[in-house]
Amino acid sequence: MEVNKTFMVMVITFLLLGLATTMAHGQGTKVGFYSKTCPKAESIISSTVQTHFKSNPRIAPGILRMHFHDCFVRGCDGSILIAGSSTEKTAAPNSGIPGYNVIDDAKKQLEAACPGVVSCADILALAARDSVVVTKGISWQVPTGRRDGRVSIASDTNNLPGPSESIASQTSKFKAKGLNTQDLVTLVGGHTIGTAACRFVTGRLYNVNSSSGADPSIDPTFLPQLRALCPRNGDASKRIDLDTGSGSHFDISYFINLSKGRGILASDQLLWTDASTKGFVQRYLKSLSTFNSEFAKAMVKMSKIGVLTGTQGEIRKVCTAIN
């Protein structure tokens, strides 16, 4: 009898440990989590994104970036949405992102439809998908069931990948989140609808130790256009497309531009010149369907980083403040 009791304790312990490990990797989420508790949740979020996109197309890349920054800091827990004097939202990488109002609007509608049910973290994950869709990109099924975090600290954003960071450093940061080199190239491919402030670009255009005075990896025929977009001593806050010529459409033009030396950020262009990432760029610039498929997979994978589920965290009443 004692042997049986011991065996049962071991089995229960093993199952609990397995459950904890599963939850830690985001497997507490599932597609259709709100199908019974708030069946219109996804359609409400989708229509909200579409409505705001019509009046301000910049919200699409903004929300996609917001989701990425949320997941890379404390996991995909909606902590980027919390307002306050020293929260993630106020940090330099997040303060100018358009689209926070879209999430707040969707949350207001969802609270009216099904109070206290849908988390802000899930709204952001779903809105990121919908932002790709409205820019003519692929759709995918988003696992939901995330709960909202209660902690948001501006300094936690210091470890986000930067606009001039080496591939080795970027790869290391992605690996720390359980993402590999292909995930890095794939997710950065979201820059096909992204923008950057000139302050992150001008360092490549002027006073560089080269014959042209610019980063030699830049296509010489593209340099005048880039300098016209971001003139010396111009408006450092001016934003330009990261995918020149196709910034409003989710496509593979971004990768084609990299192959021509037309990457806007130093970190982007390195994807083409670094041996560890170039192969993935070459694969994607040849096939939109391949990129779309891999992007959907990578987004689902990223959206499971450090999620809170079950009784962890909370369901915020408003996305800008903890309950």
Image: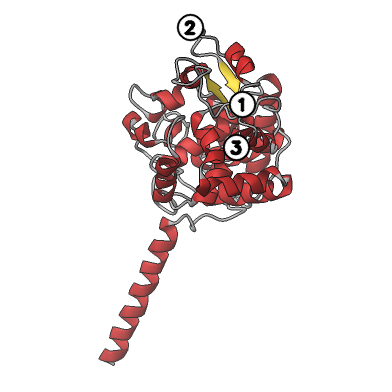
| Residue extending farthest bottom | 1
The span from disc 1 to disc 3 (Cα, nearest Å) is 22 Å
Instruction: Decide which of 150, 158 is in the foreground and name it.
Output: 158
For residue 233, the mark is 2
Percent position of residue 49, x then y: 65, 31
Q: Residue at x 54, y 50 (%)?
A: 182
Q: Residue at x 54, y 33 (%)?
A: 269
The span from disc 3 to disc 2 (Cα, nearest Å) is 29 Å
The span from disc 2 to disc 1 (Cα, nearest Å) is 22 Å
User: What crowding class fits label 2: few (fewer than 14 Cα within 10 Å), some (14-19), or many (20 or more)?
Assistant: few
Q: Amino acid at mark 3?
A: Gly
Residue at which label 1 appears: 219
Q: Amino acid at mark 2?
A: Asn
Quadrant of residue 196 in the image? top right
For residue 190, the mark is 3
Q: Is residue 248 left or right of residue 179?
A: right
Q: Residue at x 67, y 25 (%)?
A: 53
Please name which of the two marks, 3 or 2, marks the residue nearer to the observer: 2
